[in-house]
C-alpha cells in the first residue's frame, strides 16, 4: 500500500486501517474541506501526525492549529473534535489501547 494513493472524500474524512492488533491501531485519514464535527471520547490514547495540509481541532475547549509535520498526543477520554480541514489533509493516527 502507498500512503499517497487515495481518493479525496467529498465530505468528512475517510479512514483506512494500516495495521491493527490487540494493542495498537494505525489509520490513514484523508480529510475533505467539510469536516465531520463529531465530538470524540475515545477509550484509547491517540497520537496523530499531519503529513499534508492543515487542520484546526478543539480539545477540551481550546483550539489547536496543526499544519504539515505537526504531531499531537490525545490522551484517552480527552474530548476533541475537528473544526476545520483543508481538502486533502493527510493524517496518520496511532491508537494505543
Image: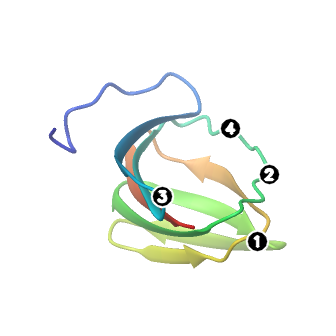
Secondary structure category for the residue under label 1 = loop
- Gap between marks 2 and 3, in whole Å? 25 Å
Q: Tell me the SS state at disc 3.
A: loop
Q: Earlier in the sequence, mark 1 or mark 2?
A: 2
In the structure shown, which secondary structural element does the residue marked by tag 2 occupy? loop
User: Is 43 located above or below residue 87 in the figure?
Assistant: below
Q: CA separation, marks 1 and 2?
A: 10 Å
Residue 1: image location, x then y, percent: 16, 38
Q: Earlier in the sequence, mark 1 or mark 3?
A: 3
Q: Position of residue 42 (x, y in %)?
A: 71, 59
Marks 4, 3: nearer the viewer: 3
Q: Earlier in the sequence, mark 2 or mark 3?
A: 3
Circle 4 residue: 36
Q: Is residue 88 visible?
A: no
Q: Which of the marked residues, 4 or 1, is nearer the chain's N terminus?
A: 4
Q: Is residue 63 left or right of residue 17?
A: right
Is there CB contact under 8 Å for labels 4 and 1? no
Asked whether disc 1 touches disc 2, contact meaning CB atoms under 8 Å apart, the reply is no
Q: Residue at x 64, y 66 (%)?
A: 44
Q: Which residue is mark 2?
A: 39
Q: Identify the residue under disc 3.
A: 22
Query: Crowding at label 3, few (<14), some or many (≥20) Cα neighbours within 10 Å?
Result: few
- Which residue is outermost to the left? 2
Q: Is the C terminus in the top left, top right, bottom left or bottom right quadrant? A: bottom right
Q: CA distance from mark 2 to mark 4?
A: 9 Å
Identify the residue position indicated by label 1 in the image: 78
Left or right, residue 19 beside residue 35: left
- Give the CA distance from mark 4 to mark 1: 18 Å
Q: Is residue 31 above or below residue 72?
A: above
Give whichever of 82, 24 is nearer the camera.
24
Q: Position of residue 9 (x, y in %)?
A: 46, 25
Look at the numbered discs 1 and 3 and tell me whether their residues touch, using CB distance below 8 Å. no
Amino acid at each position: 500500500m502507498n500512503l499517497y494513493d487515495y481518493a479525496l472524500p467529498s465530505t468528512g474524512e475517510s479512514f483506512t486501517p494500516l495495521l491493527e492488533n490487540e494493542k495498537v491501531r494505525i489509520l490513514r485519514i484523508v480529510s475533505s474541506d467539510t469536516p465531520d464535527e463529531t465530538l470524540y471520547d475515545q477509550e484509547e490514547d491517540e497520537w496523530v501526525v499531519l503529513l499534508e495540509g492543515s487542520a484546526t481541532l478543539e480539545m477540551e475547549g481550546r483550539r489547536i492549529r496543526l499544519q504539515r509535520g505537526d504531531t499531537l498526543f490525545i490522551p484517552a477520554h480527552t474530548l476533541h473534535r475537528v473544526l476545520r480541514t483543508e481538502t486533502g489533509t493527510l493524517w496518520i493516527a496511532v491508537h494505543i489501547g
